[in-house]
């Protein structure tokens, strides 16, 4: 196997295996986010949402928590405070470094759900769902979200042919 092919294979294997175990909501809720917000995974990104004084800041990083420039990117935050209440929408714009920022008239409560949508240049659009004031004690509430291992079918492709 050539060296470059081995690197591609190892990189692909890591890319497939890391998100399954390390980037659940429970994982992010158990660690301190770099800017004091709530973190979620969105495709190839780690997104951190920070809300204060009618302002939303979304920090963008890769899976190694390396900052990704937001230059040329666009975003939107859809905010719903409680079920059945009207949603509001805030445009997020690049604000230097790895930040997208927007302002609007909204209040964050423990029932608030914020869904962010981002599109960076030459990348697919991604979204993430945040509940910024969610109590940490309720993080491991959904047992059906646990990773199901061993559900591989068709193991015939592993057999050697002579």
Image (cartoon, rainbow, N blue to C red):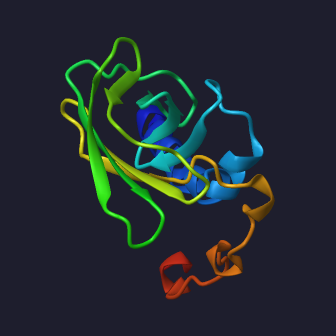
Q: Is residue 98 above or below residue 117?
A: above
Q: Tell me residue 62's x, y (percent).
A: 48, 32
Left or right, residue 26 beside residue 11: right
Q: Is residue 146 visible?
A: yes
Residue 131 is left or right of residue 73, and the answer is right
Image: 18 above or below 74: below
Q: Answer yes or no: is residue 162 visible.
A: no
Task: Tell me what residue is drawn at x 66 percent, y 32 percent.
Answer: 33
Q: Horizontal and vertical percent for residue 106?
A: 40, 42
Q: Is residue 78 left or right of residue 56?
A: left
Q: Nearer the viewer, residue 101 or 147?
A: 101
Give whichever of 56, 144 is nearer the camera.
56
Nearer the observer, 157 or 120: 120
Residue 142 quadrant: bottom right
The furthest residue to the top: 96
Where on the picture, by quarter, is residue 64? top right
Tally of numbered tags = 0
Tell me what residue is drawn at x 32 percent, y 34 percent: 104
Eyeballing the image, is 112 above or below 99?
Answer: below
In the figure, 67 relative to 84: above or below?
above
Residue at 39% x, 13% y: name it: 97
């Amino acid at each position: 196997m050539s060296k470059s092919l081995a690197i591609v294979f190892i990189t692909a294997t890591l890319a497939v295996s890391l998100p399954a175990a390390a980037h659940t909501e429970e994982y992010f809720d158990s660690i301190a986010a770099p800017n004091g917000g709530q973190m979620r995974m969105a495709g190839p990104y780690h997104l951190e949402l920070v809300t204060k004084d009618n302002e939303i800041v979304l920090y963008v990083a890769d899976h190694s928590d390396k900052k990704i420039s937001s230059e040329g990117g666009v975003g939107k935050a859809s905010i719903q405070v409680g079920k059945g209440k009207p949603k509001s929408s805030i445009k997020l714009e690049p604000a230097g470094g790895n930040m997208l920022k927007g302002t609007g008239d909204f209040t964050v409560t423990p029932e608030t759900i914020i869904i962010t949508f981002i599109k960076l240049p030459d990348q697919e659009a991604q979204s993430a769902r945040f509940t910024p004031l969610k109590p940490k004690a309720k993080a491991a509430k959904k047992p059906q979200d646990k990773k199901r291992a061993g559900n591989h079918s068709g193991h015939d492709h592993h057999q050697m042919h002579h």
